[in-house]
Amino acid sequence: MAAPVWSVDPRSGKQREEVAAEATAEEVDATVRAAHEARGSLADRTVRAAFLRRAADLLDQAGDSVIEAADAETALGPGRLTGELARTTAQLRAFADIVDEGAFLDVLIDHADPQQTPPRPDLRRYKIPLGVVAVYSASNFPLAFSVPGGDTASALAAGCPVVVKAHPDHPATSELCAALLRRAATESGLPAAVVGLVHGFDAGVELVRHPLISAAGFTGSVRGGRALYDAAAARPHPIPFHGELGSLNPVVVTRDAAEERPEQIGAGLAGAMTLGVGQFCVKPGLVLVPEGAAGDGLVKELTAKVSDTEAGVLLDHRMRDAFVAGVQARAELPDVEAPVTPGAGGEHTVSAGFLTLPAARLATEGPHDLLLEECFGPVTVVARYADDAEATAVLGRLPGNLTATLQLSTAEGAGEGRGGELLAEVTALAGRVVVNGWPTGVAVAPAQHHGGPYPATTSTSTSVGGTAIERWLRPVVYQDTPPALLPPELREENPLGLPRRIDGVREA
């Protein structure tokens, strides 16, 4: 008999009534096979776009119920969740627009040219969907990175059915959103099976190993993501695994910037590291600040602002316990001080805080390397550097990140001093570089990139923005294929009106 899946109230730690059953291997198999059988129904781009827009409309219409369910399970609060729902439905509509436009198919046609050396045959290239995509929901975004989130929206936009593995922190929200997506599918003339949902740890492992799963998207921890990544690679037929695993998101504050606006930077850092009780994947977790008077004003303002931050609830008690243990282990390291002590704020809450230490402790390998690992929750590490060489030495030891931030002075921003040199240093570390801002808040825009070198992500792609659709497609070329046999997307007369590049020239 399948084990029950319980919803746990993060505010009290108490179990609530059973909301779903953990899927058995047989149920995972049936869900994946149903999605595989439904894949042909997504071939029509007009239908796909209508489906995505209908899904957005239904989520908006059920907004009060969705937000109530999500808040009950995550304690993220109606304000935060209202914004997340708006982001989620905007993503769905944005991908519908991308589907309508058709540029994502990347149609390239090179006509035959016997005069070339060697002679060129007729070549016609575009991209096709991979097949059924497994999506692993994130704990900290029950909407935007879960059942109706960016992985699901981009995969459906590419023409791939999805099977979502629900996160145990919000099973009821997952069920509600999946039901709305399935309703949108049937109202758009598609089988409900284009969106599947399973619960349970074992179900997640079965999912990535299933022979009919063609790719996977994951947002979560390094440990969990790496286990699934390895399982995807160990299959008889390995599949792409696009995982977002963990990120320290370093910040470098130059001496000139610290002297120019210490209060502004200190207040901005306090807001970024405590936003959402520190439960954002782009929270700044390591900040390089100059020693001496230049950095003292910044640390003073950071101390004041963080001290005024109220204790908050993390997503579940497992995460709370990990946070409390993690900050304690870090605070016990030699030369580490806590101007504002992070840790338990109450029986079910945590208090924000930050740690400081000399940056020299991080410049070489040792026990302080623990501080170079992400600690999920409202804490950051301020490393005080003596000179530019010391800051560069610490940056040289960092793993890959989603973001890196520079706080530069006005003159440095105008090209004077080390601004350009620092930009090059942090570009090697991250997928998004922020200058004189903060990384929290990932705009959903065509030019966005939410990814980075390992362990930030397991691939070079993005999970946010229009190009996220590329993860679920593969190119195919037809050579010297009779016109009557060509897919409509590649026919000379362009019956679908797609953007194309012909013999190297973009069509007007």
Image: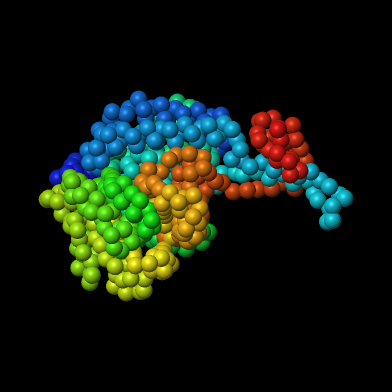
Rendered residue at 38%/67% (across/down) = 387
Q: Is residue 453 above or below residue 13?
A: below
Rendered residue at 20%/49% (across/down) = 304
Task: Name the colouring of the figure.
Answer: rainbow
Rendered residue at 45%/34% (across/down) = 92
Quadrant where the C terminus lies? top right
Q: Is residue 258 visible?
A: yes
Q: Nearer the viewer, residue 382 or 300?
A: 300
Q: Is residue 133 visible?
A: no
Q: Nearer the viewer, residue 104 or 295?
A: 295
Q: Position of residue 180 (x, y in %)?
A: 37, 31
Q: Is residue 28 above or below residue 87?
A: below
| Quarter occupied by residue 174 | top left
Residue 472 left/right relative to 304: right
Q: Nearer the viewer, residue 316 or 395?
A: 395
Q: Nearer the viewer, residue 471 or 134?
A: 471
Residue 340 left/right relative to 261: left
Q: Position of residue 438 (x, y in %)?
A: 37, 47
